Amino acid sequence: MSTTHKPSRGRFGAPRRIRPLATAATAATLALGLAACSGGPASTNAVSDGKGGKSIEATMAFTLSSGFDPGNASSAVATAANQHIFEGLVDLDPITREPYLALAKAFPTPSADGRTYTVSLRDGAKFSDGTPVTGEDIAWSFNRVLKPADPAAPPLMQGFIPFIETVTAKDASTAEFKLKYPFALFAERISVIKIVPKAKTADAAAAKAFDTAPIGSGPMKLDSASKESGIKMSRNPNYNGPRPTKVDTMTWNTTSEAAARVSDLQGGRVQAIESVPYLNVDSLKGKYTVDVKQAFNQVFLMFNTQAAPFNDKRVRQALHYAIDKEAVIKTALNGYGSPATSYLDEGNKGYQKAATVYDHDLDKAKALLAEAGVKNLSIQLDTTDNSVVKDVAPLVVEQWKKIGVNASLNTVPSAAIYGDVVPKDTFRVLMATGDPSVFGVDTDLLMRWFYYGETWPGKRYRWNDADRKAMAALLDKAAQTSDEAARKALWKQALDMVADEVPLYPILHTKVVTAYDPAKITGFSGAATTGLYFLDSSRSG
Protein backbone atom coordinates (compact mmCIF):
# COMPACT_ATOMS: atom_id res chain seq x y z
CA MET A 1 0.00 0.00 0.00
CA SER A 2 7.88 2.97 -3.89
CA THR A 3 6.06 6.32 -3.87
CA THR A 4 6.67 9.63 -2.25
CA HIS A 5 3.33 9.83 -0.52
CA LYS A 6 1.60 6.52 -0.35
CA PRO A 7 2.44 2.98 0.68
CA SER A 8 4.43 1.12 -1.93
CA ARG A 9 2.24 -1.92 -1.53
CA GLY A 10 -0.61 -0.25 -3.33
CA ARG A 11 -2.88 -1.00 -0.36
CA PHE A 12 -4.51 1.29 2.14
CA GLY A 13 -2.61 0.71 5.32
CA ALA A 14 -2.13 -2.94 4.32
CA PRO A 15 -5.68 -3.79 5.38
CA ARG A 16 -7.11 -7.00 6.71
CA ARG A 17 -5.59 -10.13 5.21
CA ILE A 18 -8.92 -11.15 3.73
CA ARG A 19 -9.44 -13.50 0.84
CA PRO A 20 -11.19 -11.87 -2.09
CA LEU A 21 -14.82 -12.78 -2.72
CA ALA A 22 -13.58 -14.98 -5.52
CA THR A 23 -10.21 -16.39 -4.46
CA ALA A 24 -6.97 -15.49 -2.73
CA ALA A 25 -5.07 -16.18 -5.95
CA THR A 26 -7.02 -13.68 -8.04
CA ALA A 27 -4.24 -11.16 -8.46
CA ALA A 28 -1.99 -13.79 -9.96
CA THR A 29 -4.55 -14.53 -12.66
CA LEU A 30 -5.22 -10.95 -13.76
CA ALA A 31 -2.97 -11.13 -16.77
CA LEU A 32 -4.62 -14.34 -17.91
CA GLY A 33 -8.08 -12.84 -17.68
CA LEU A 34 -7.45 -9.50 -19.35
CA ALA A 35 -4.00 -8.88 -20.73
CA ALA A 36 -4.21 -11.06 -23.80
CA CYS A 37 -5.29 -8.09 -25.92
CA SER A 38 -2.80 -5.71 -24.36
CA GLY A 39 0.14 -4.52 -26.36
CA GLY A 40 1.79 -2.86 -23.37
CA PRO A 41 1.50 0.71 -22.12
CA ALA A 42 0.92 3.52 -24.58
CA SER A 43 3.67 5.87 -25.58
CA THR A 44 2.25 8.73 -27.57
CA ASN A 45 1.89 12.47 -27.70
CA ALA A 46 -1.24 12.24 -29.86
CA VAL A 47 -4.76 13.01 -28.75
CA SER A 48 -6.05 10.07 -30.79
CA ASP A 49 -6.11 6.57 -29.41
CA GLY A 50 -5.25 5.26 -32.86
CA LYS A 51 -8.86 4.35 -33.57
CA GLY A 52 -10.16 7.82 -34.31
CA GLY A 53 -11.13 8.60 -30.70
CA LYS A 54 -9.69 10.74 -27.95
CA SER A 55 -7.53 9.19 -25.26
CA ILE A 56 -6.02 10.00 -21.88
CA GLU A 57 -2.73 8.52 -20.73
CA ALA A 58 -1.54 8.67 -17.13
CA THR A 59 1.06 7.08 -14.87
CA MET A 60 0.03 5.71 -11.48
CA ALA A 61 2.31 5.33 -8.48
CA PHE A 62 1.56 1.66 -7.81
CA THR A 63 1.43 -1.59 -9.69
CA LEU A 64 -1.72 -3.69 -9.78
CA SER A 65 -1.80 -6.01 -6.76
CA SER A 66 -5.39 -7.18 -6.42
CA GLY A 67 -8.44 -8.06 -8.46
CA PHE A 68 -11.25 -5.68 -9.34
CA ASP A 69 -14.20 -7.18 -7.48
CA PRO A 70 -15.36 -4.05 -5.62
CA GLY A 71 -16.42 -5.98 -2.55
CA ASN A 72 -12.80 -6.69 -1.78
CA ALA A 73 -10.52 -4.69 -4.09
CA SER A 74 -7.62 -3.37 -2.04
CA SER A 75 -5.08 -2.36 -4.68
CA ALA A 76 -4.74 1.41 -5.11
CA VAL A 77 -4.81 0.93 -8.89
CA ALA A 78 -7.89 -1.30 -8.87
CA THR A 79 -9.73 1.00 -6.48
CA ALA A 80 -9.09 4.02 -8.70
CA ALA A 81 -10.09 2.09 -11.83
CA ASN A 82 -13.26 0.90 -10.14
CA GLN A 83 -14.40 4.49 -9.69
CA HIS A 84 -14.66 4.61 -13.49
CA ILE A 85 -15.96 1.06 -14.02
CA PHE A 86 -18.57 0.64 -11.27
CA GLU A 87 -21.23 2.72 -9.58
CA GLY A 88 -22.77 2.70 -6.16
CA LEU A 89 -26.33 3.82 -5.60
CA VAL A 90 -24.72 6.98 -4.25
CA ASP A 91 -21.07 7.73 -4.93
CA LEU A 92 -18.58 10.11 -3.34
CA ASP A 93 -16.93 12.50 -5.76
CA PRO A 94 -13.26 11.45 -5.69
CA ILE A 95 -12.12 15.09 -5.57
CA THR A 96 -14.68 16.95 -3.43
CA ARG A 97 -15.69 13.83 -1.44
CA GLU A 98 -19.29 15.01 -1.56
CA PRO A 99 -22.04 12.45 -2.26
CA TYR A 100 -23.83 12.48 -5.62
CA LEU A 101 -26.49 10.31 -7.24
CA ALA A 102 -24.98 7.50 -9.26
CA LEU A 103 -27.31 4.52 -9.84
CA ALA A 104 -29.97 5.81 -7.44
CA LYS A 105 -32.82 7.84 -8.89
CA ALA A 106 -33.04 9.98 -5.75
CA PHE A 107 -31.19 10.30 -2.45
CA PRO A 108 -32.46 7.71 0.03
CA THR A 109 -34.81 8.96 2.75
CA PRO A 110 -35.55 7.03 5.95
CA SER A 111 -38.82 5.76 7.31
CA ALA A 112 -40.28 7.44 10.39
CA ASP A 113 -38.27 5.22 12.72
CA GLY A 114 -35.08 5.70 10.69
CA ARG A 115 -34.63 1.96 10.12
CA THR A 116 -35.95 1.45 6.60
CA TYR A 117 -34.76 2.95 3.31
CA THR A 118 -36.21 2.31 -0.13
CA VAL A 119 -33.95 3.08 -3.11
CA SER A 120 -34.94 3.08 -6.78
CA LEU A 121 -32.61 2.78 -9.76
CA ARG A 122 -32.26 5.45 -12.41
CA ASP A 123 -34.27 4.70 -15.53
CA GLY A 124 -32.59 2.55 -18.16
CA ALA A 125 -29.44 1.75 -16.17
CA LYS A 126 -27.40 -1.05 -17.77
CA PHE A 127 -24.16 -2.88 -17.17
CA SER A 128 -21.45 -2.65 -19.80
CA ASP A 129 -22.53 -5.99 -21.29
CA GLY A 130 -25.94 -4.48 -22.07
CA THR A 131 -27.95 -6.27 -19.37
CA PRO A 132 -30.26 -4.13 -17.18
CA VAL A 133 -29.32 -3.27 -13.61
CA THR A 134 -32.09 -4.59 -11.35
CA GLY A 135 -33.32 -4.42 -7.79
CA GLU A 136 -32.09 -7.99 -7.40
CA ASP A 137 -28.57 -6.84 -8.37
CA ILE A 138 -28.73 -4.20 -5.64
CA ALA A 139 -29.79 -6.68 -2.99
CA TRP A 140 -27.21 -9.23 -4.12
CA SER A 141 -24.36 -6.69 -4.17
CA PHE A 142 -24.96 -5.84 -0.51
CA ASN A 143 -25.87 -9.31 0.76
CA ARG A 144 -22.81 -11.02 -0.73
CA VAL A 145 -20.75 -8.66 1.43
CA LEU A 146 -22.97 -8.83 4.53
CA LYS A 147 -23.38 -12.62 4.41
CA PRO A 148 -20.50 -14.12 2.41
CA ALA A 149 -20.30 -17.77 1.50
CA ASP A 150 -17.31 -18.11 3.85
CA PRO A 151 -18.06 -16.16 7.08
CA ALA A 152 -14.50 -16.78 8.25
CA ALA A 153 -13.20 -14.63 5.38
CA PRO A 154 -15.43 -11.54 5.38
CA PRO A 155 -15.02 -9.16 2.42
CA LEU A 156 -13.11 -5.95 3.02
CA MET A 157 -16.20 -3.76 2.67
CA GLN A 158 -18.17 -5.65 5.30
CA GLY A 159 -16.74 -3.63 8.18
CA PHE A 160 -18.09 -0.39 6.72
CA ILE A 161 -21.78 -1.41 6.70
CA PRO A 162 -22.44 -3.11 10.07
CA PHE A 163 -25.65 -1.09 10.48
CA ILE A 164 -27.45 -2.94 7.66
CA GLU A 165 -29.60 -5.91 8.66
CA THR A 166 -31.03 -7.01 5.31
CA VAL A 167 -31.44 -5.82 1.73
CA THR A 168 -34.25 -7.17 -0.43
CA ALA A 169 -35.45 -6.52 -3.96
CA LYS A 170 -38.94 -5.02 -3.94
CA ASP A 171 -39.34 -5.07 -7.71
CA ALA A 172 -37.26 -4.86 -10.89
CA SER A 173 -35.91 -1.40 -10.07
CA THR A 174 -36.25 -1.01 -6.29
CA ALA A 175 -34.54 -2.37 -3.19
CA GLU A 176 -35.40 -2.03 0.49
CA PHE A 177 -32.84 -1.70 3.26
CA LYS A 178 -33.63 -2.73 6.83
CA LEU A 179 -31.19 -1.32 9.39
CA LYS A 180 -30.22 -2.64 12.81
CA TYR A 181 -30.42 0.91 14.09
CA PRO A 182 -30.87 4.38 12.57
CA PHE A 183 -27.67 5.51 10.90
CA ALA A 184 -27.44 9.16 9.94
CA LEU A 185 -24.65 8.62 7.40
CA PHE A 186 -26.57 5.99 5.40
CA ALA A 187 -26.71 7.85 2.07
CA GLU A 188 -22.98 8.47 1.80
CA ARG A 189 -21.83 5.24 3.44
CA ILE A 190 -23.58 2.96 0.96
CA SER A 191 -21.14 4.37 -1.60
CA VAL A 192 -18.64 1.73 -0.44
CA ILE A 193 -20.76 -0.98 -2.08
CA LYS A 194 -20.62 -0.93 -5.86
CA ILE A 195 -23.44 -2.67 -7.71
CA VAL A 196 -22.43 -5.81 -9.60
CA PRO A 197 -24.49 -8.17 -11.79
CA LYS A 198 -25.75 -11.14 -9.79
CA ALA A 199 -25.63 -13.30 -12.90
CA LYS A 200 -21.86 -12.78 -13.16
CA THR A 201 -21.00 -13.26 -9.47
CA ALA A 202 -23.53 -15.79 -8.13
CA ASP A 203 -21.08 -18.63 -7.44
CA ALA A 204 -17.38 -19.04 -6.71
CA ALA A 205 -16.37 -19.82 -10.26
CA ALA A 206 -18.27 -16.86 -11.67
CA ALA A 207 -16.92 -14.54 -8.99
CA LYS A 208 -13.37 -15.66 -9.73
CA ALA A 209 -13.77 -14.80 -13.41
CA PHE A 210 -15.48 -11.53 -12.55
CA ASP A 211 -12.56 -10.46 -10.36
CA THR A 212 -10.28 -10.41 -13.40
CA ALA A 213 -12.85 -9.30 -15.99
CA PRO A 214 -15.28 -7.01 -14.17
CA ILE A 215 -18.56 -5.75 -15.60
CA GLY A 216 -20.00 -2.57 -14.14
CA SER A 217 -22.44 0.20 -14.96
CA GLY A 218 -19.89 3.04 -14.83
CA PRO A 219 -18.80 5.30 -17.71
CA MET A 220 -15.79 3.13 -18.64
CA LYS A 221 -15.21 -0.59 -19.10
CA LEU A 222 -12.02 -2.52 -18.47
CA ASP A 223 -10.29 -3.87 -21.59
CA SER A 224 -7.04 -5.24 -20.16
CA ALA A 225 -5.03 -5.21 -16.98
CA SER A 226 -1.76 -6.62 -15.73
CA LYS A 227 0.95 -5.78 -13.25
CA GLU A 228 3.42 -5.26 -16.09
CA SER A 229 1.43 -3.32 -18.68
CA GLY A 230 -1.02 -1.42 -16.50
CA ILE A 231 -4.66 -0.67 -17.27
CA LYS A 232 -6.58 -0.06 -20.47
CA MET A 233 -10.19 1.15 -20.39
CA SER A 234 -12.67 2.33 -23.01
CA ARG A 235 -16.03 4.03 -23.14
CA ASN A 236 -19.00 2.00 -21.86
CA PRO A 237 -21.53 2.38 -24.71
CA ASN A 238 -24.41 1.44 -22.39
CA TYR A 239 -23.77 4.11 -19.76
CA ASN A 240 -26.62 6.60 -19.25
CA GLY A 241 -25.63 8.10 -15.91
CA PRO A 242 -24.72 11.61 -14.74
CA ARG A 243 -21.00 11.51 -15.57
CA PRO A 244 -20.46 10.27 -19.13
CA THR A 245 -16.82 10.01 -20.16
CA LYS A 246 -15.45 12.70 -22.46
CA VAL A 247 -12.79 10.42 -23.96
CA ASP A 248 -12.94 7.12 -25.78
CA THR A 249 -10.04 5.33 -24.11
CA MET A 250 -7.67 5.56 -21.17
CA THR A 251 -4.30 3.94 -20.59
CA TRP A 252 -2.77 3.89 -17.13
CA ASN A 253 0.90 3.02 -16.89
CA THR A 254 1.95 1.80 -13.45
CA THR A 255 5.28 2.20 -11.69
CA SER A 256 6.51 2.73 -8.16
CA GLU A 257 9.60 4.52 -9.51
CA ALA A 258 9.16 8.25 -8.89
CA ALA A 259 11.70 9.27 -11.54
CA ALA A 260 9.89 7.21 -14.15
CA ARG A 261 6.61 9.00 -13.46
CA VAL A 262 8.23 12.42 -13.80
CA SER A 263 9.94 11.32 -17.02
CA ASP A 264 6.61 10.10 -18.42
CA LEU A 265 5.07 13.54 -17.90
CA GLN A 266 8.02 15.59 -19.10
CA GLY A 267 8.51 13.36 -22.12
CA GLY A 268 4.88 13.78 -23.18
CA ARG A 269 4.09 10.10 -22.79
CA VAL A 270 1.24 10.92 -20.40
CA GLN A 271 -0.85 13.91 -19.43
CA ALA A 272 -1.02 13.30 -15.66
CA ILE A 273 0.93 11.55 -12.90
CA GLU A 274 0.25 10.90 -9.26
CA SER A 275 2.58 11.02 -6.28
CA VAL A 276 4.98 13.68 -7.57
CA PRO A 277 8.29 13.52 -5.67
CA TYR A 278 8.47 16.48 -3.32
CA LEU A 279 11.88 17.47 -4.63
CA ASN A 280 10.47 17.73 -8.17
CA VAL A 281 7.59 20.07 -7.38
CA ASP A 282 9.36 23.35 -8.13
CA SER A 283 10.91 22.11 -11.37
CA LEU A 284 7.50 21.00 -12.69
CA LYS A 285 5.69 24.23 -11.87
CA GLY A 286 5.13 26.52 -14.81
CA LYS A 287 4.68 24.19 -17.73
CA TYR A 288 2.61 21.81 -15.63
CA THR A 289 -0.10 22.30 -13.06
CA VAL A 290 1.02 20.93 -9.70
CA ASP A 291 -1.93 20.19 -7.42
CA VAL A 292 -1.13 19.94 -3.69
CA LYS A 293 -3.77 18.52 -1.33
CA GLN A 294 -3.61 17.92 2.40
CA ALA A 295 -4.32 14.23 2.90
CA PHE A 296 -5.42 11.93 5.67
CA ASN A 297 -2.57 9.61 4.68
CA GLN A 298 -0.47 9.18 7.78
CA VAL A 299 2.89 7.92 8.90
CA PHE A 300 2.08 6.09 12.13
CA LEU A 301 3.69 4.18 14.98
CA MET A 302 2.07 0.93 16.07
CA PHE A 303 3.04 -0.97 19.22
CA ASN A 304 2.58 -4.47 20.54
CA THR A 305 0.61 -3.30 23.56
CA GLN A 306 0.84 -6.68 25.28
CA ALA A 307 4.63 -6.74 25.31
CA ALA A 308 6.71 -4.93 27.94
CA PRO A 309 7.54 -2.11 28.11
CA PHE A 310 4.94 -1.05 25.54
CA ASN A 311 2.11 -2.45 27.64
CA ASP A 312 2.59 0.80 29.57
CA LYS A 313 1.07 3.68 27.61
CA ARG A 314 3.58 6.10 29.15
CA VAL A 315 6.35 4.43 27.14
CA ARG A 316 4.30 4.70 23.97
CA GLN A 317 3.59 8.34 24.71
CA ALA A 318 7.26 9.05 25.41
CA LEU A 319 8.32 7.90 21.96
CA HIS A 320 5.76 10.25 20.40
CA TYR A 321 6.81 13.25 22.52
CA ALA A 322 10.45 12.66 21.56
CA ILE A 323 9.82 13.22 17.86
CA ASP A 324 10.44 16.70 16.42
CA LYS A 325 7.73 16.42 13.80
CA GLU A 326 8.34 19.79 12.22
CA ALA A 327 12.00 18.91 11.65
CA VAL A 328 11.02 15.52 10.23
CA ILE A 329 8.53 17.09 7.82
CA LYS A 330 11.01 19.72 6.68
CA THR A 331 13.82 17.24 6.11
CA ALA A 332 12.06 14.10 4.91
CA LEU A 333 9.02 15.60 3.17
CA ASN A 334 10.47 18.91 2.02
CA GLY A 335 7.68 20.57 4.03
CA TYR A 336 4.81 18.65 2.36
CA GLY A 337 3.10 17.39 5.49
CA SER A 338 1.63 18.46 8.81
CA PRO A 339 2.22 17.24 12.38
CA ALA A 340 -0.60 15.10 13.71
CA THR A 341 -2.79 16.98 16.18
CA SER A 342 -5.49 14.33 15.99
CA TYR A 343 -6.07 10.98 14.33
CA LEU A 344 -7.83 12.99 11.61
CA ASP A 345 -5.93 15.41 9.40
CA GLU A 346 -6.76 19.09 9.79
CA GLY A 347 -8.23 19.21 6.28
CA ASN A 348 -10.95 16.70 7.17
CA LYS A 349 -14.40 18.24 7.64
CA GLY A 350 -14.84 16.18 10.80
CA TYR A 351 -11.49 17.23 12.30
CA GLN A 352 -11.38 17.81 16.05
CA LYS A 353 -8.13 18.54 17.84
CA ALA A 354 -7.27 15.79 20.30
CA ALA A 355 -7.01 16.51 24.01
CA THR A 356 -3.46 15.12 23.87
CA VAL A 357 -1.16 16.58 21.24
CA TYR A 358 2.40 15.25 21.00
CA ASP A 359 4.40 18.42 20.61
CA HIS A 360 8.16 17.99 20.70
CA ASP A 361 8.98 17.75 24.42
CA LEU A 362 12.12 15.83 25.37
CA ASP A 363 11.77 16.58 29.09
CA LYS A 364 8.26 15.14 29.16
CA ALA A 365 9.39 12.10 27.20
CA LYS A 366 12.22 11.44 29.66
CA ALA A 367 9.90 11.93 32.62
CA LEU A 368 7.36 9.44 31.27
CA LEU A 369 10.07 6.82 30.74
CA ALA A 370 11.30 7.40 34.28
CA GLU A 371 7.78 7.06 35.69
CA ALA A 372 7.44 3.78 33.83
CA GLY A 373 10.78 2.58 35.22
CA VAL A 374 12.33 2.27 31.77
CA LYS A 375 15.96 3.13 31.06
CA ASN A 376 18.47 2.27 28.34
CA LEU A 377 15.73 0.91 26.11
CA SER A 378 16.90 -0.88 22.96
CA ILE A 379 14.37 -1.94 20.34
CA GLN A 380 13.99 -2.98 16.74
CA LEU A 381 11.88 -0.56 14.72
CA ASP A 382 10.17 -2.50 11.95
CA THR A 383 9.17 -0.43 8.93
CA THR A 384 7.54 -0.94 5.57
CA ASP A 385 9.56 -0.10 2.47
CA ASN A 386 7.42 2.91 1.59
CA SER A 387 9.69 5.74 0.43
CA VAL A 388 8.31 8.27 2.92
CA VAL A 389 8.77 5.82 5.78
CA LYS A 390 12.32 5.09 4.62
CA ASP A 391 13.06 8.83 4.74
CA VAL A 392 11.30 9.45 8.07
CA ALA A 393 12.47 6.45 10.10
CA PRO A 394 16.20 7.26 10.34
CA LEU A 395 15.38 10.78 11.57
CA VAL A 396 13.10 9.41 14.25
CA VAL A 397 15.71 6.88 15.34
CA GLU A 398 18.23 9.71 15.81
CA GLN A 399 15.76 11.75 17.83
CA TRP A 400 14.94 8.83 20.12
CA LYS A 401 18.61 8.63 21.09
CA LYS A 402 18.13 11.96 22.89
CA ILE A 403 15.87 10.25 25.43
CA GLY A 404 18.06 7.16 25.80
CA VAL A 405 16.19 4.92 23.36
CA ASN A 406 18.27 3.07 20.78
CA ALA A 407 16.51 1.55 17.80
CA SER A 408 17.76 -0.56 14.93
CA LEU A 409 15.85 -0.49 11.64
CA ASN A 410 14.30 -3.53 9.98
CA THR A 411 12.77 -2.48 6.65
CA VAL A 412 10.80 -5.03 4.62
CA PRO A 413 7.86 -4.95 2.17
CA SER A 414 4.38 -4.49 3.61
CA ALA A 415 3.27 -8.00 2.74
CA ALA A 416 6.10 -9.38 4.88
CA ILE A 417 5.46 -6.88 7.67
CA TYR A 418 1.82 -7.83 8.12
CA GLY A 419 2.16 -11.46 7.09
CA ASP A 420 5.28 -12.40 9.03
CA VAL A 421 6.78 -9.71 11.29
CA VAL A 422 3.77 -8.28 13.14
CA PRO A 423 2.09 -11.63 13.99
CA LYS A 424 5.17 -12.89 15.83
CA ASP A 425 5.58 -12.55 19.58
CA THR A 426 8.90 -10.79 18.98
CA PHE A 427 7.19 -7.79 17.34
CA ARG A 428 7.41 -4.52 19.30
CA VAL A 429 7.18 -1.32 17.22
CA LEU A 430 6.20 -0.59 13.63
CA MET A 431 6.38 2.54 11.49
CA ALA A 432 4.19 2.44 8.40
CA THR A 433 1.70 4.46 6.36
CA GLY A 434 -2.04 4.08 5.94
CA ASP A 435 -4.88 5.82 4.12
CA PRO A 436 -8.40 4.33 4.09
CA SER A 437 -9.84 7.72 3.09
CA VAL A 438 -10.19 6.49 -0.50
CA PHE A 439 -13.32 4.69 0.75
CA GLY A 440 -14.75 7.71 2.58
CA VAL A 441 -13.79 10.58 4.84
CA ASP A 442 -16.33 10.54 7.67
CA THR A 443 -15.00 9.99 11.17
CA ASP A 444 -16.89 6.75 11.71
CA LEU A 445 -15.44 5.06 8.63
CA LEU A 446 -11.88 6.25 9.22
CA MET A 447 -11.87 5.22 12.89
CA ARG A 448 -13.41 1.83 12.25
CA TRP A 449 -10.58 1.00 9.86
CA PHE A 450 -7.88 0.93 12.56
CA TYR A 451 -9.76 0.79 15.87
CA TYR A 452 -12.74 -1.54 15.40
CA GLY A 453 -13.00 -5.27 14.91
CA GLU A 454 -10.36 -7.94 15.17
CA THR A 455 -7.69 -7.38 12.54
CA TRP A 456 -5.91 -4.25 13.74
CA PRO A 457 -6.87 -4.01 17.45
CA GLY A 458 -6.80 -7.74 18.16
CA LYS A 459 -4.21 -9.28 15.88
CA ARG A 460 -1.84 -6.42 15.19
CA TYR A 461 -1.45 -4.03 18.09
CA ARG A 462 -3.10 -6.44 20.52
CA TRP A 463 -5.20 -3.90 22.43
CA ASN A 464 -6.67 -5.16 25.70
CA ASP A 465 -10.31 -6.20 25.80
CA ALA A 466 -11.42 -3.30 27.98
CA ASP A 467 -10.06 -0.64 25.63
CA ARG A 468 -11.35 -2.44 22.54
CA LYS A 469 -14.84 -2.72 24.02
CA ALA A 470 -14.79 0.91 25.13
CA MET A 471 -13.83 2.09 21.64
CA ALA A 472 -16.41 -0.13 19.98
CA ALA A 473 -19.08 1.17 22.35
CA LEU A 474 -18.22 4.79 21.54
CA LEU A 475 -18.26 4.25 17.78
CA ASP A 476 -21.47 2.20 17.87
CA LYS A 477 -23.22 4.74 20.08
CA ALA A 478 -22.13 7.59 17.79
CA ALA A 479 -23.35 5.66 14.75
CA GLN A 480 -26.79 5.30 16.35
CA THR A 481 -27.02 8.94 17.41
CA SER A 482 -29.16 11.11 15.15
CA ASP A 483 -28.20 14.42 16.77
CA GLU A 484 -25.15 15.77 14.97
CA ALA A 485 -23.71 17.63 17.95
CA ALA A 486 -24.07 14.60 20.22
CA ARG A 487 -22.51 12.37 17.58
CA LYS A 488 -19.58 14.75 17.20
CA ALA A 489 -19.09 14.77 20.99
CA LEU A 490 -18.91 10.97 21.04
CA TRP A 491 -16.40 11.01 18.19
CA LYS A 492 -14.34 13.52 20.19
CA GLN A 493 -14.21 11.02 23.05
CA ALA A 494 -13.01 8.36 20.65
CA LEU A 495 -10.38 10.66 19.13
CA ASP A 496 -9.17 11.64 22.61
CA MET A 497 -9.00 8.00 23.67
CA VAL A 498 -6.72 6.90 20.83
CA ALA A 499 -4.59 10.03 21.29
CA ASP A 500 -4.06 9.12 24.92
CA GLU A 501 -3.58 5.38 24.45
CA VAL A 502 -1.58 5.58 21.16
CA PRO A 503 -1.67 1.86 20.33
CA LEU A 504 -1.54 2.97 16.69
CA TYR A 505 -1.30 6.71 16.10
CA PRO A 506 -0.01 9.10 13.44
CA ILE A 507 3.19 11.06 13.66
CA LEU A 508 2.20 13.18 10.68
CA HIS A 509 -0.21 13.51 7.77
CA THR A 510 1.29 13.91 4.33
CA LYS A 511 0.28 16.11 1.43
CA VAL A 512 -0.54 14.53 -1.91
CA VAL A 513 0.97 16.11 -5.01
CA THR A 514 -0.41 15.47 -8.50
CA ALA A 515 0.88 17.00 -11.74
CA TYR A 516 -0.74 17.33 -15.15
CA ASP A 517 -0.33 19.13 -18.45
CA PRO A 518 -3.09 21.78 -18.73
CA ALA A 519 -2.44 22.15 -22.45
CA LYS A 520 -3.41 18.52 -23.01
CA ILE A 521 -6.07 17.77 -20.42
CA THR A 522 -8.91 19.87 -19.01
CA GLY A 523 -11.49 19.35 -16.28
CA PHE A 524 -8.99 17.45 -14.15
CA SER A 525 -7.97 17.92 -10.50
CA GLY A 526 -5.72 15.96 -8.20
CA ALA A 527 -7.28 13.97 -5.37
CA ALA A 528 -6.39 14.06 -1.68
CA THR A 529 -5.82 10.32 -1.68
CA THR A 530 -4.33 7.62 -3.87
CA GLY A 531 -5.30 7.40 -7.51
CA LEU A 532 -6.10 9.57 -10.51
CA TYR A 533 -9.69 10.26 -11.50
CA PHE A 534 -10.88 11.44 -14.91
CA LEU A 535 -14.66 11.43 -14.58
CA ASP A 536 -14.96 15.00 -15.87
CA SER A 537 -11.76 15.25 -17.90
CA SER A 538 -11.34 16.05 -21.58
CA ARG A 539 -8.35 15.57 -23.86
CA SER A 540 -7.07 18.50 -25.87
CA GLY A 541 -3.90 19.90 -27.38
Image: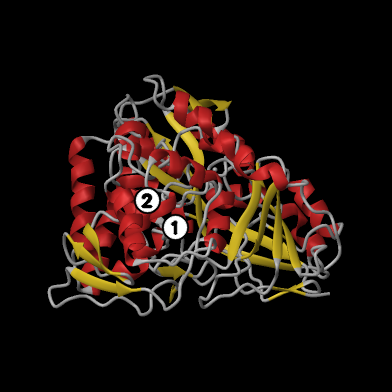
Depth check: give the residue in front, 267 or 46: 46
The residue tagged 1 is 439
Other-residue count near label 1 (Cα within 10 Å), few / some / many at <14 / 14–19 / ≥20? many
Q: Residue at x 64, y 70 (%)?
A: 525
Q: Nearer the viewer, residue 278 or 207?
A: 207
Query: Picture coordinates of residue 208 (x, y %)?
Result: 47, 40
Secondary structure under the numbered disc 1 in the rendered image: loop
Mark nearest the camera among 2 and 1 is 2
Position of the N terminus by quadrant: top right
What whole-number distance in Å separates the C-alpha atoms at marks 2 and 1? 9 Å
Label 2: element kind: helix
- Residue 302 seen in the figure: yes
The residue to which callout 2 is attached is: 157
Q: Residue furthest left?
A: 113
Report which quarter residue 233 is drawn in: bottom right
- Residue at (81, 74) in percent of width and height: 519
Q: Is residue 510 visible?
A: no
